[in-house]
Amino acid sequence: MDKRLHSLPCGYISMTPQGIILDVNRTFLEMGNYTQDNLISHHIESIMSVANKLLFHSCFYPFIQLNGYVDEIYLNLKGSNGTDIPVLFNGKYYEETDVVDCIFVHMGRRIDYEQEIRKAKILVEEAYREKNVALVKMEELHLELEHKQIELLKLNNKLEILSITDGLTGLKNRRYFIEKLDEYLVQLKQTNCLFSLLILDIDHFKSVNDTHGHLIGDEVLIQLAKLLADFFPKDYTIARYGGEEFVVILPLRNEEESLKEAELLRSTIQFAKWEIMKITVSIGVATSNPMDTTSSIMAHADKALYSSKESGRNKVTHATFQII
């Protein structure tokens, strides 16, 4: 341990989140007349009274798990000769090392504080003696807290997935797509790794809804989404942009490669075995350049899509090439 850390004007302990002491500075040893053998690899609660163990359970473990830190916990530690050592205790958890660093400031003889601790000690020890009721209750609360933490993590994970998923098709949604597009543009400026963008639109989709109803229209969107997911590799970003428009980011694809891939997609959709009714799509393609922004590359691809529609639909147009 660093010499300055050893001689800090406060006690220092490094321990696991479960309370096993890993390291301790000289100031803390002197504070309680301890030796390293008394402390290293022992539980922090080994130098606490029953009352303080329960106080530690109720304050330290829940807060360190929920917040990653605890502030200003008043404790009485037991010195090696049995004397009470009133301390102010702060701790912080470091996830990368799975260690909690703790600081103990000796509070001296503070009459009011000691009186409150003694009262609390009497009350808690009485409860502890009554068939360990208080301890059992604390364990129950601790387990309940752990269960609720797990439920909260699951719920947060579910909400995160829902927030980036299109509810109808199961593809990623517009929000997720824009975030990924921003990431690709940043990467382009840093590494010069180009990519291409497809925007595809179902031809005459309004007539599908008007003629067959919105439920059939939804089924068409679901089937197209599945075709896109099956057609492209897993590392491609595929999303429903809105309505009958879908977008795809093609990593490391230049103008010719993206145009060829888009044309193969257009043909695959045209000649697919559709369960309800055949559809075709118009596709606009744009390839990135270092000057692009999210708005500019989207505008280029959208302009190419408009050109595909204007030239008769069921077409592919690249922003820099002729219609094929």
Image: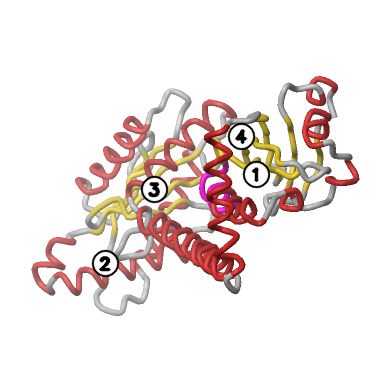
Task: Give the image location of residue 197, x and y in percent.
Answer: 41, 43
Q: Distance from label 3 to label 2 (Cα)? A: 26 Å
Which secondary structure dominates the residues rendered in magenta? helix
Q: In the shown orientation, is residue 161 left or right of residue 130?
A: left
Q: Distance from label 3 to label 4 (Cα)? A: 46 Å
**Amino acid type shown at disc 2:** Ile
Q: Secondary structure at mark 3?
A: helix
Q: Are marks 4 and 2 in contact (CB under 8 Å)?
A: no
Task: Give the image location of residue 142, x and y in percent.
Answer: 54, 62
Name the residue carrying label 2: 279
Quadrant for the N terminus in the image: top right
Q: Nearer the viewer, mark 1 or mark 4?
A: 4
**Amino acid type shown at disc 4:** Leu
Q: Disc 4 or 2, which lies upstream in sequence?
A: 4
Q: Secondary structure at mark 1?
A: loop
Name the residue carrying label 1: 95
Within the image, what quadrant is residue 281 found in?
Answer: bottom left
Name the residue carrying label 4: 88
Q: Are marks 1 and 4 in contact (CB under 8 Å)?
A: no
Q: Is residue 196 magenta?
A: no
- Is 77 above or below relative to 192? below
Q: Which residues are magenta?
A: 61-69
The residue lying toward the viewer, choosing from 208 and 295, is 295
Q: Disc 3 or 4, which lies upstream in sequence?
A: 4
- Is 44 above or below relative to 141? above
Q: Disc 2 or 1, which lies upstream in sequence?
A: 1
Q: Disc 3 or 2, which lies upstream in sequence?
A: 3
Q: Nearer the viewer, mark 4 or mark 2?
A: 4
Q: Secondary structure at mark 4?
A: strand
Within the image, what quadrant is residue 302 found in?
Answer: top left
Binning the other alpha carbons within 10 Å of mark 1 as few (below 14), some (14 to 19) or many (20 upward) gives: few
Q: Disc 1 or 3, which lies upstream in sequence?
A: 1
